[in-house]
Amino acid sequence: MLGKDHAHYVPTDSIDEQDIYAYLGSWAQGHRIVEDGKMAHVETGSSGLDTADPARQG
């Protein structure tokens, strides 16, 4: 999903298996892209868990 540069966006050395399962569980509850001007981020779950890195619109 993130491509070859995924390590730039997802710091694989600081997450563990439980972090991955927590995010996937939150994703399964719901997800949406939230736009803020030229930036966007993904919120997941019912509490709006936010991704760490926003995406910039080109």
Image (cartoon, rainbow, N blue to C red):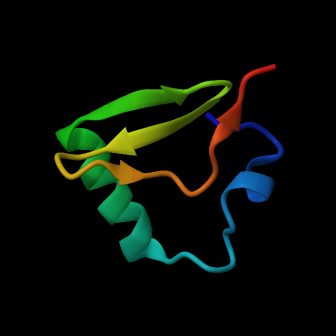
Q: Quadrant of residue 17?
A: bottom left
Q: Residue furthest top?
A: 58
In the image, taking residue 13 as reference, residue 50 lies left or right, namely left
Judge by depth and name the residue closer to the eye, 27 or 47: 47
**The N terminus: image quadrant:** top right
Judge by depth and name the residue closer to the eye, 13 or 42: 42
Query: Is residue 36 positioned above or below 4 on the image?
Result: above
Query: Is residue 10 positioned above or below 37 on the image?
Result: below
The image shows residue 25 at horizontal and vertical percentages of: 25, 53
Q: How many marks?
A: 0
Q: Residue at x 69, y 67 (%)?
A: 11
Q: Quadrant of residue 10?
A: bottom right
The image shows residue 36 at horizontal and vertical percentages of: 54, 30
Q: Residue at x 51, y 26 (%)?
A: 35
The image shows residue 42 at horizontal and vertical percentages of: 46, 38
In the image, taking residue 3 as reference, residue 40 lies left or right, namely left
Judge by depth and name the residue closer to the eye, 16 or 29: 29
**The C terminus: image quadrant:** top right
Q: Residue at x 37, y 75 (%)?
A: 18
Q: Residue at x 31, y 43 (%)?
A: 27
The image shows residue 15 at horizontal and vertical percentages of: 55, 75
Q: Residue furthest front?
A: 37
